[in-house]
Image (cartoon, rainbow, N blue to C red):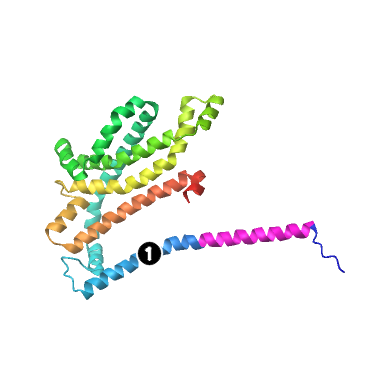
């Protein structure tokens, strides 16, 4: 009977082929999932627009109550310049408030980690300020800071502040004892422990908070514009509401939401670039 024993080289070659096929299947699966993540939201949005359009047509809903998507798209096209002019101050207020609120939160979180007394004194105040509704904070800040961009930036900063404070404090503090012991054995300075261990450990927590803040900062800026502003997305919403201009109202909301989504996307892109070492945990 013929000897059918495979040589080590043949066995190794078969294993190599199997590995190559597995890698090819994995790559194809990843491409499929990437396409799926891109296509499904588009299909969902188109489906919702179709349902909206058909509902308006079938039930004969008056335009001042709920305009059709076609009417909203027409306003977006015809009044695009005016919408962008009003978006600019809102974007500036949201971005400046985002930066100011998060810098303050990161600074205070660092103080909390290194000083328990500071945390016990100021954390309850931060909680109390966070419980005040935004619509109640806005008039107070307008009275204190005037009617320019300053109160809108302050509102956006306040609305970003608390989530980042909580997440950053947890991230800086959530370091394993073994890691701290290793840094001490290696004679690391307090500065090296902070930047190479605590900050690195806190980055996933921080970006989770920043993605929330990217959306809420826009909300804060818009709410601030509702209180005595003549320009911006918030002021345009009030103007459209008072004039029963429903297509303009919806178009303004679309513009504000699109900017908020783009802001969120920028932070998500930055997270993927900065946290390359954490991709496996985030996926």
Looking at the image, how many numbered discs can be counted on the residues?
1
For residue 220, above or below residue 78: above
For residue 207, above or below residue 1: above
Can residue 89 be seen at all in this image of the molecule? no
- For the stretch drawn in magenta, what is the main secondary structure? helix
Q: In the displayed structure, does residue 209 sit left or right of residue 283?
A: left
Residue positioned most to the left:
243
Where residue 45 sits in the image (x, y, percent)? 34, 64
Residue positioned most to the right:
1
Which image quadrant for residue 198?
top left
Q: In the displayed structure, does residue 66 sit left or right of residue 174?
A: left
For residue 278, above or below residue 182: below
Residue placed under numbered mark 1 in the picture: 42
Judged from the image, the secondary structure of the residue bearing numbered disc 1 is helix
In the rendered structure, does residue 193 fall within the stretch colored magenta? no
Q: In the displayed structure, does residue 174 sit left or right of residue 223?
A: right
Which image quadrant for residue 158?
top left
Which residue is located at x 25 percent, y 69 percent? 70
Residue positioned most to the bottom:
58
Where residue 80 sits in the image (x, y, percent)? 25, 60
Q: Which of 247 and 138 is in front in this view?
A: 138
Where residue 269 sits in the image (x, y, percent)? 42, 49
Which residue is located at x 33 percent, y 54 percent? 261
Image quadrant where one finds the N terminus: bottom right
Label 1 Cα crowd, 10 Å radius (few <14 / some 14-19 / many 20+): few
Which residue is located at x 26 percent, y 32 percent? 125
Can residue 211 be seen at all in this image of the molecule? yes
Where residue 191 sits in the image (x, y, percent)? 46, 27
Magenta-drawn segment: 8-31
């Amino acid at each position: 009977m013929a000897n059918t024993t495979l040589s080590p080289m043949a066995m190794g070659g078969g294993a190599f082929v199997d590995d190559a096929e597995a890698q090819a299947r994995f790559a194809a699966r990843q491409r499929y999932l990437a396409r799926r993540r891109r296509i499904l939201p588009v299909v969902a949005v188109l489906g919702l627009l179709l349902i909206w359009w058909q509902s308006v047509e079938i039930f004969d809903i008056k335009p001042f109550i709920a305009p059709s998507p076609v009417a909203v798209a027409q306003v977006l096209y015809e009044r695009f310049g005016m919408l962008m002019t009003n978006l600019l101050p809102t974007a500036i207020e949201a971005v400046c408030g985002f930066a100011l609120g998060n810098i303050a939160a990161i600074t205070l979180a660092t103080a909390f980690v290194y000083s328990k007394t500071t945390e016990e004194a100021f954390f309850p105040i931060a909680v109390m300020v966070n419980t005040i509704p935004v619509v109640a904070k806005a008039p107070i800040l307008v009275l204190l800071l005037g009617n320019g961009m300053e109160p809108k930036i302050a509102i956006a900063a306040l609305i970003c502040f608390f989530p980042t404070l909580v997440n950053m404090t947890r991230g800086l503090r959530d370091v394993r004892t073994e890691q701290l012991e290793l840094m001490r054995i290696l004679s690391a300075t307090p500065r090296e422990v902070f930047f190479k261990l605590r900050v690195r450990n806190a980055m996933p927590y921080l970006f989770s908070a920043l993605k929330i803040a990217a959306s809420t900062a826009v909300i804060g800026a818009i709410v601030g514009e509702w209180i005595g502003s003549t320009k911006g997305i918030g002021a345009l919403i009030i103007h459209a509401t008072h004039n029963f201009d429903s297509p303009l109202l919806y178009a303004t909301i679309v513009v504000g939401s699109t900017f908020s989504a783009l802001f969120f996307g920028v932070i998500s892109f930055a997270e993927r670039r900065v946290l390359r070492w954490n991709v496996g945990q985030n996926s």
